[in-house]
């Protein structure tokens, strides 16, 4: 088990991460998610020992790693740009961590065969690492990290240098490998789709501070604050400033009521609703809005509407596609109040009934 | 475009020919007879005398001098590459107190001509009893500011991730340097090898001052045999010159690519 306590690191005046606490269970796939510059890579580098921490504790298997040098931590890492040894062949790259850790020489070829099989690298084992394509280099980087069966496997945006199709393919591949080897993994990404599909749990980070930790469903369905709500999900969640009075509030010009909120005192709130939770209807008594742009995105269609000079985003599934009018025409909408989440106007935090 | 290229090529051929004339003249002279050299300025040779080479080799005890030159040049070259790589790496990558000052000192040694150092060096070597010894000829030369500077410039450009990856893979500083980082700066090593070897091979001054026994001569000093009291044996001298140019010539042919790479890469980034 990997445990991180009060991890804090400053670079001169900038705080890279502050009071980061989390635990990763054995075999768990843990994702650090956040926009660029949020400190997620710093956290990863601190775990690897590539940076020295200002304060805090990194504990692996009940042993503090703080005073352990990088080369003596049983941690492996895949770098964003792979950092393969350019002067060596793929085989030599894979052998390097084994040789450095004094693995029995007679066993090395067998281990290499195994990892090459797992990552389908057999056909380019004897090529120079620099001569490979991006996807192949990525495989080698993963292979080099996994070849010595580390206790902790760190990945720093490993898919971000690849094209979309390859990225998707390798994402599935990574999930498969993780299932097979079951190594405790910490994965850094700014891509919410990667985080959602790969992560057992996700930690959302902003400006070096934890926003939320949870399973992907929780992160999506009840974001702890507005930052998480807006960062996760495409298109972006719809937000409306409104006033909560005895469980009632106004949204898009209509009254709505949520029973569970009735005990909360009157206050200014922000109502948030996911684009797929706004329905498009044709009953004649719904909320009126105007369709500005529609984008077909596979089975779903993304609609950008205008209502009282405010943009409203919708995700319409295939079944309801027939109800979508032409651009610039009127649309009729319906909201299910139970799907609305309320956030405190001041603290931007989710109001829990 | 085509005519422009053609003109440039013609110009280049003419210039290279001008540079080649002295070499051609040396070869021609080395194949003429002693009298013919002094009486004819012709590029044509009346009678080829290849025996000049054999005579030159024997007259100057060349085999021994070749060995001396080789031992010193190779030792100094390898020594310089080792010290330059280590010092350059430290100056490029290890954050220690006074790094900038040390680097400035290293750089400032580049502006001190060797001739200024010769007297204090001679005094030191004679106190050590190192006059007429290989170590006296080798050890003062094994560290050099230029080499350190060259390696530092190359090391600075090696991506940090490579070293970090090596650390994560379990490599200590020493294996990281020699197995991962050093292979990335081979052009620097190649350049330094050619520069240092040629400079050492052609060195006359150092040998003139630090040695006085006939056993401790190098090939350059060996050429003085052909300077007799009243005349110079030009044919054998030129034959000897050709013989001793061969190693450096070979080195240039082999190392040409690396040399150009090294100079252009190392020079661009300041």
Image (tube, grey):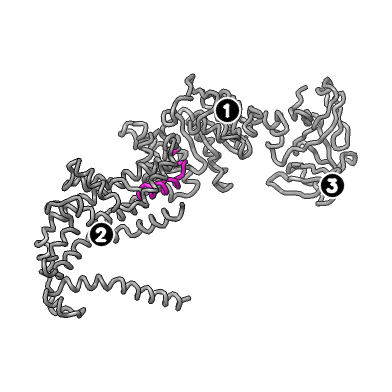
Q: Are marks 3 and 2 in contact (CB under 8 Å)?
A: no
Mark 3 to mark 2: distance in Å? 82 Å
Label 2 Cα neighbours within 10 Å, binned few <14 / some 14-19 / many ≥20:
some
Q: Whole-percent x and y of residue B31? A: 15, 72
As helix, strand or loop, the secondary structure at mark 1 comes to: strand
Q: Quadrant of the C terminus of chain A?
A: top right
The residue at which mark 1 appears reads as A8
Left or right: A217, with A255 as reference point:
left
**What is the number of the mark on residue A290?**
3
Label 3 secondary element: strand
Give the residue drawn at x 26%, y 71%: B22
Residue A153 horizontal/vertical position (percent) = 49, 32
Q: Nearer the viewer, mark 3 or mark 1?
A: 1
Give, as a single range, the part of the protein colored magenta. Answer: B146-163
Query: Disc 2 designates what residue?
Result: B248
Label 1: how many Cα within 10 Å (few below 14, some 14–19, many 20+): many
The quadrant holding residue A91 is top left
Decide whether residue A245 is among the magenta residues: no
Above or below, comparing residue B27 to residue A267 in the picture: below
């Amino acid at each position: 088990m990997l445990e991180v306590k009060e991890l804090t690191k400053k670079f001169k005046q900038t705080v890279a991460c502050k009071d980061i606490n989390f635990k990763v269970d054995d075999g768990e796939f843990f994702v650090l998610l956040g926009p660029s510059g949020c400190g997620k890579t710093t956290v990863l580098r601190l775990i690897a020992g590539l940076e020295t921490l200002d304060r805090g504790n990194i504990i692996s298997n009940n042993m503090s790693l703080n005073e352990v040098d990088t080369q003596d931590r049983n941690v492996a890492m895949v770098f964003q740009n792979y950092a393969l040894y350019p002067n060596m062949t793929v085989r030599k790259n894979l052998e390097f961590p084994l040789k450095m850790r004094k693995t029995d020489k007679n066993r090395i070829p067998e281990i290499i065969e195994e990892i090459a099989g797992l990552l389908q690298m057999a056909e380019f084992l004897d090529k120079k690492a620099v001569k490979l394509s991006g996807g192949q280099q990525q495989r080698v980087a993963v292979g080099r990290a996994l070849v010595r069966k580390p206790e902790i496997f760190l990945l720093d945006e490993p898919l971000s240098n690849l094209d979309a199709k390859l990225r998707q393919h390798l994402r599935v591949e990574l999930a498969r490998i993780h299932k097979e080897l079951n190594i405790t993994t910490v994965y850094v990404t700014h891509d919410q789709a990667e985080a959602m599909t790969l992560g057992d749990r996700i930690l959302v980070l902003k400006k070096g501070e934890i926003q939320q930790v949870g399973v992907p469903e929780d992160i999506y369905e009840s974001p702890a604050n507005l930052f998480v709500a807006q960062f996760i999900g495409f298109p972006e969640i719809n937000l409306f400033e409104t006033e909560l009075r005895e469980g009632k509030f106004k949204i898009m010009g209509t009254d709505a009521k949520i029973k569970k909120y009735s005990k909360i005192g009157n206050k200014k709130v922000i109502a948030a609703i996911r684009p797929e939770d706004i329905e498009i209807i044709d009953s004649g008594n719904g909320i009126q809005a105007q369709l500005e742009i529609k984008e077909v995105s596979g089975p779903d269609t993304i609609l950008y509407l205008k209502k009282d000079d405010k943009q409203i985003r919708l995700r319409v599934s295939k079944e309801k596609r027939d109800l979508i009018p032409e651009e610039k025409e009127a649309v009729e909408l319906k909201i299910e109040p139970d799907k609305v989440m309320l956030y405190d106007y001041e603290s931007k935090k989710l109001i829990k009934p | 475009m085509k005519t422009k290229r053609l003109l440039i090529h013609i110009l280049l051929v003419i210039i290279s020919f001008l540079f080649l004339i002295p070499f051609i003249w040396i070869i021609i002279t080395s194949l003429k007879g002693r009298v013919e050299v002094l009486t004819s300025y012709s590029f044509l040779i009346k009678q080829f005398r290849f025996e000049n080479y054999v005579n030159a080799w024997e007259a100057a005890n060349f085999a021994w001098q070749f060995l001396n030159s080789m031992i010193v040049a190779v030792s100094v070259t390898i020594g310089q590459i080792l010290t330059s790589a280590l010092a350059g790496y430290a100056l490029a990558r290890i954050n220690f107190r006074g790094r900038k000052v040390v680097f400035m000192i290293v750089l400032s040694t580049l502006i001190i001509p060797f001739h200024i150092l010769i007297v204090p060096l001679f005094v030191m070597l004679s106190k050590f009893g190192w006059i007429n010894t290989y170590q006296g000829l080798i050890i003062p030369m094994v560290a050099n500011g230029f080499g350190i500077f060259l390696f530092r410039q190359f090391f600075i450009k090696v991506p940090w991730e490579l070293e970090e990856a090596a650390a994560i893979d379990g490599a200590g500083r020493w294996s990281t340097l020699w197995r991962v980082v050093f292979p990335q700066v081979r052009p620097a090593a190649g350049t330094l090898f050619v520069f240092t070897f040629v400079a050492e091979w052609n060195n006359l001054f150092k040998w003139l001052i630090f040695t006085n026994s006939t056993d401790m001569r190098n090939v350059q000093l060996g050429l003085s045999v052909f300077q007799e009291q009243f005349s110079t044996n030009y044919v054998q001298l030129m034959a000897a010159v050709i013989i001793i140019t061969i190693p450096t010539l070979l080195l240039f042919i082999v190392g040409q690519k690396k040399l150009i790479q090294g100079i252009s890469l190392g020079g661009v980034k300041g």
